[in-house]
Image (cartoon, rainbow, N blue to C red):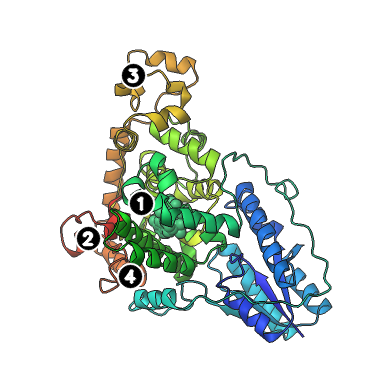
Amino acid sequence: MTTLVWFKRDLRITDHAVLAEAAARGPVLPLYIVEPELWALPDASGRQWAFVAECLQDLRSDLAALGMPLVVRIGDAVTVLAEMAQTHGVDLLLSHEETGNGWTYTRDQRVAAWAREAGLPWRETQQAGVVRRLTTRDGWAAQRDKTMRQPQIEAPTAVPPLDVALGAIPSVKDLGLEDVCPERQRGGRQEALSLLGSFLTTRGQTYRKAMSSPLDGEWACSRLSPHLAFGTLSSREAAQASAARKAEVKGTRAGWTGAMQSFQARLAWRDHFMQKLEDEPRIETHCLHSAYENTRPRQPDAVRLAAWEAGETGLPFVDACMRYLTATGWLNFRMRSMLMALASYHLWLDWRATGHILARRFTDYEPGIHWSQTQMQSGTTGMNTVRIYNPVKQGHDQDPDGIFTRRWVPELADIPDKYLQEPWKWDGAGALLGRGYPEPVVDVAAAAKAAREKVWAVRRGDAFRAEAARVVKKHASRKDGPRHFVNDRDPRRSSGKRPKKSDTQLSLDL
Ligand SMILES: Cc1cc2nc3c(=O)[nH]c(=O)nc-3n(C[C@H](O)[C@H](O)[C@H](O)COP(=O)(O)OP(=O)(O)OC[C@H]3O[C@@H](n4cnc5c(N)ncnc54)[C@H](O)[C@@H]3O)c2cc1C
């Protein structure tokens, strides 16, 4: 009898509870299902698949070294699982729990229904800190930290070979996923380990200071996000490696302790935000606070949407960030926040349309983080500070020499520094149109003011507060949680004061 291990967003053999359990039991059929319907969704893209395909190559060879390479099949999950189970005498189906989008949620329900009917037990195991069927957020943070401290699970020493055709790993072209991302990050376990190593020993030293700049952050951030998203590295591996590094550098080299603390805080945020989607899957499609449901037109303004998507808003730093993201598949946190907030406030576009565009551009698309952050940066949660970025100021602050802006918006290469972020104020602005660079799609100050008024107008009234209280109870981090947990409630409602800028409040205050 054989255990079928269904790999999803856990593309590794180390610290893989499911594989270890299956191997201890006997023969294992390790399977990845390429689901064309999933890859045709509006949040999926060619860059994500190209990354996954590289991960699958690595996983296939890591499993081959144990004795049984990865099997890959293309098709509907239920159909593939049924066929594999029947043909190969499978008596147990194991996988990690997946906090995915609505489609994967429904697919898992279909798989569960089929497994029940077929009499095949399907057991799902918790991965990282996200807890399924959580009844309350009280005590969740401590529970999550406990999971992170548990010993890592060693890879099995051997997996007996089975006589199964392995199946080819399809290319981006095979799946019809056209995408141009010349500077995309590479997938695979080896790449994940190399990034973790270089971050912990060299790149991470300036992490805290450098993370806000798109130029410096590219190097100083861990860049582990796609690996954590598709599981070539477990977040426990990252958390424990950074804890070990923190202990090692204690009292020695400047910057390292703070860097490791900040990194660990973000790993905790990862679970914190993913837990929100796990607890309330509809936040992918509905405003967390229902009062915001009809504030923006559901049919977004096509001209503004197209300008934002193409990096042609006429706002140089915004366009530079969008073009950089398009070419690399990655952007630092602060600039992701700015792109989202600009779309939702200044351009007054519905977060669902813009959220899908960003999801496709991110190689590291992780539904739980993505939709929670998308709503948070759009002011639709009802519990977070409304943060309207000034893109001109952000440009000056984060790109003071204009290197990043000029690199990604070459139309502005020769514009004087003083006008780089506001070219419409320059005497020679007329010439920019000739070069194809547009006038600003909105008046930044007027658009921000109008948005602020509309958003705050919704916040008044008892009904708003009552629902906001429900949202806080269900989703907010708790004050008694460990220090590294972000307190993501609106501080003005609890203390009446603006928060002090500290690492634990970054997601509020950035
Ligand atoms: C609108 C918006 C959408 C986002 N969508 C995604 C997404 O789809 N996938 C994704 O992984 N991140 C997303 N983020 C969070 C964050 O921007 C990225 O995790 C980070 O930039 C990835 O780079 P890094 O791995 O070098 O991060 P590091 O700074 O090195 O952080 C380490 C890890 O911590 C986690 N993390 C970091 N920041 C956050 C955060 N603010 N919230 C939750 N977890 C965090 C990530 O797993 C990250 O890999 C989004 C942020 C915003 C504002």
How far apart marks 1 and 2 lie (CA) works out to 31 Å
Write down the residue under mark 4.
470
Q: Earlier in the sequence, mark 2 or mark 3?
A: 3
- Work out whether 234 lies above or below 3: above
Neighbour tally class for label 4: few under 14, some 14-19, many 20 plus, Cα within 10 Å? some
**Along the line of sight, the residue nearer the viewer: 256 or 349:** 256
- Work out whether 27 lies above or below 244: below
Q: Point out the quarter of the image occupied by ligand 1.
A: bottom left
Report the amino acid beneath label 2.
Pro
Q: Which of marks 4 and 3 is nearer the N terminus?
A: 3
Q: Earlier in the sequence, mark 1 or mark 2?
A: 1
Write down the residue under mark 2.
491
Instruction: Give the secondary structure at mark 1.
Output: helix
How far apart marks 2 and 3 lie (CA) works out to 40 Å
Whether the residue under disc 3 has CB within 8 Å of ligand 1: no
Q: Which of marks 3 and 1 is nearer the N terminus?
A: 1
Query: In this image, 19 relative to 145: left or right?
Result: right
Query: Residue 363, image x and y in percent?
Result: 55, 50
Write down the residue under mark 3.
416
Viewer-side label of 1, 2: 1
How far apart marks 3 and 1 lie (CA) works out to 33 Å
Query: In this image, 166 relative to 241: left or right?
Result: right
Query: Residue 151, image x and y in percent?
Result: 47, 78
Specify the quadrant of the image occupied by residue 503: bottom left
User: Residue sitting at 40 percent across and 74 percent down?
Assistant: 144
Viewer-side label of 1, 4: 1
Q: Which mark is residue 205?
A: 1
Neighbour tally class for label 1: few under 14, some 14-19, many 20 plus, Cα within 10 Å? many
Instruction: Give the secondary structure at mark 4.
Output: helix
